[in-house]
Image (tube, rainbow, N blue to C red):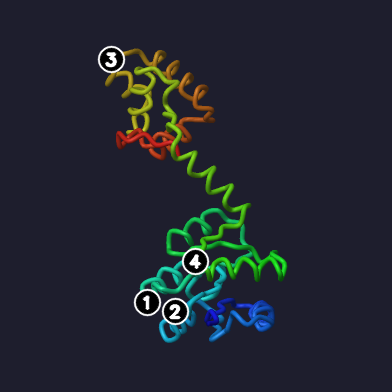
Amino acid sequence: MSTSVLLVDDHEVVRKGIRSLLALTDDFEVVGEAAGGAEAIERARDLAPDLIVIDLMMPDVDGVEAIRAIKKLSPRSAIAVLTSTDQDDLAFAAIEAGAQSLLFKSMLGDELLTTLRRIAGGEAVIHPFVAQRILKAVRRKREPREDPFASLTERELDVLRKLAEGGSNARIAAALNIGEKTVKSHLGNVLAKLHLADRTEAVAFAWRRGLMSGERDDD
């Protein structure tokens, strides 16, 4: 029994190339094509194909959103992303949306055909280049997150908080019961330790890294 396939790509030459490749076999049957995400969702709903080969970069609805919608409409369909983009965020988003496999268009004909057969057989295939980056990303998430303010003393943190609240040197000095020269010295240390150019950058850094919300973030 042949594997029914839906081809989704906004470039007709790509769809024709894959269709021609699959036509040389007895185990694949292209039952439909789509040139965009919205059309892909409709075709997947109507055809419920065994395998969907889809690009990520498309007009109207992008590949990730299309994958998410397709998995709700036809959960039985295996989805193989075939793309030319090497953006990590898109690759990860596609997998999270429901894609089982992620391949690159640079794959040669025989290699692609063999890989599609593996996917049709139930395997999840991730291109080695993408797999390496996924592993690195997972490892980074497991590593302890460094506190961006770890190098500052408690007094320097107090001064930075007051600065981020809009305080002048005089107001900071009054609030912390220290001299203005001391405030200036602490600010100088803050800028040096955090490698910031001026007070404005210090304020932006404090808010962006979560100092003012109490949730320090290393993003």
Spatial CA distance of label 2 from label 4 is 22 Å
- What's the mark number on residue 73? 1
Q: Amino acid at mark 4?
A: Gly
Q: What is the secondary structure assignment of the residue under circle 2?
A: helix
Q: Position of residue 151 (x, y in %)?
A: 45, 21
- Please report whichever mark, 2 or 3, sits nearer to the chain's N-terminal start: 2
Spatial CA distance of label 2 from label 3 is 64 Å
Q: Is residue 164 visible?
A: yes
- Please report whichever mark, 2 or 4, sits nearer to the chain's N-terminal start: 2
Residue at which label 2 appears? 41
**For residue 155, above or below residue 95:** above
- Please report whichever mark, 4 or 3, sits nearer to the chain's N-terminal start: 4
Residue at 64% of width from left, 63% of height from top? 104
- What's the mark number on residue 122? 4
Mark nearer the viewer, 2 or 3: 2
**For residue 110, above or below residue 163:** below
- Please report whichever mark, 1 or 3, sits nearer to the chain's N-terminal start: 1
Residue at 33% of width from left, 22% of height from top? 158
Spatial CA distance of label 1 from label 2 is 8 Å
Q: As drawn, is 8 to the left or to the right of 152?
A: right
